[in-house]
Image (cartoon, helix red, strand yellow):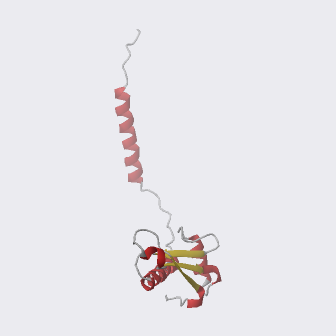
Amino acid sequence: MSEFNISENEVELKAIRSGGPGGQNVNKVATAIQLRFDSQQSSLPDYIKVRILRLNDQRINSDGIITITARQFRNQEANRLAALERLNKIIQKAGIQPKKRKATRPTRASVQKRLDAKTKRSRVKQLRTRITPDDD
């Protein structure tokens, strides 16, 4: 299924009725697929399980259970393949190691340029103020 070899018994697939337009057929045939995958109880490596929990994805709950609903196609098999493909993408996304951030400092020239711009803007605003006559 993916490069991490998830077995079929770890994935729970359930046929559900698909909503929306479709005439009489939509009320009789369960063509949509709901996929449930418990990432924490799976055979995935531990580092992938931790990263799945950290992913900001509404399809993953706090216990690490991934729920995907596929209702894009009009037949069950195509929706099953689409759901499995989406699961693969989530696992592959979790497999990508984020790059470490290198701390950087602004250059002296960029700091000076910013301060000069602030001074110039301050001067423009000062010139806009009302001039009051001096009481000498």
Which residue is nearer to you in this view: 47 or 18? 18
Between residue 136 and residue 24, name the one nearer to us: 24
Q: Residue furthest top?
A: 136
User: Of 17 and 131, which appears nearest the observer?
Assistant: 17
Q: Does the image show residue 44?
A: no
Outermost front residue:
24
Residue 24 seen anywhere in this rendered image of the structure? yes
The quarter of the picture where the C terminus appears is top left
Q: In the displayed structure, does residue 50 sit left or right of residue 93?
A: right
Q: Nearer the viewer, residue 124 or 34?
A: 34
Residue 12 image offset from top left, x and y in percent: 58, 83
124 shown above or below 54: above
Residue appearing at x 57%, y 71% in the figure: 60
Q: Residue at x 58, y 70 (%)?
A: 54
How many numbered circles does the render carry?
Answer: 0
Q: Quadrant of residue 40?
A: bottom right
**In the visual, does 28 lie left or right of 53?**
left
Residue at point 65%, 83% (across, down): 41
How far across and down, in percent of the image, does residue 72 sit?
41, 75
Q: Position of residue 32 (x, y in %)?
A: 48, 77
Residue 26 spot, x, y in % from top left: 44, 74
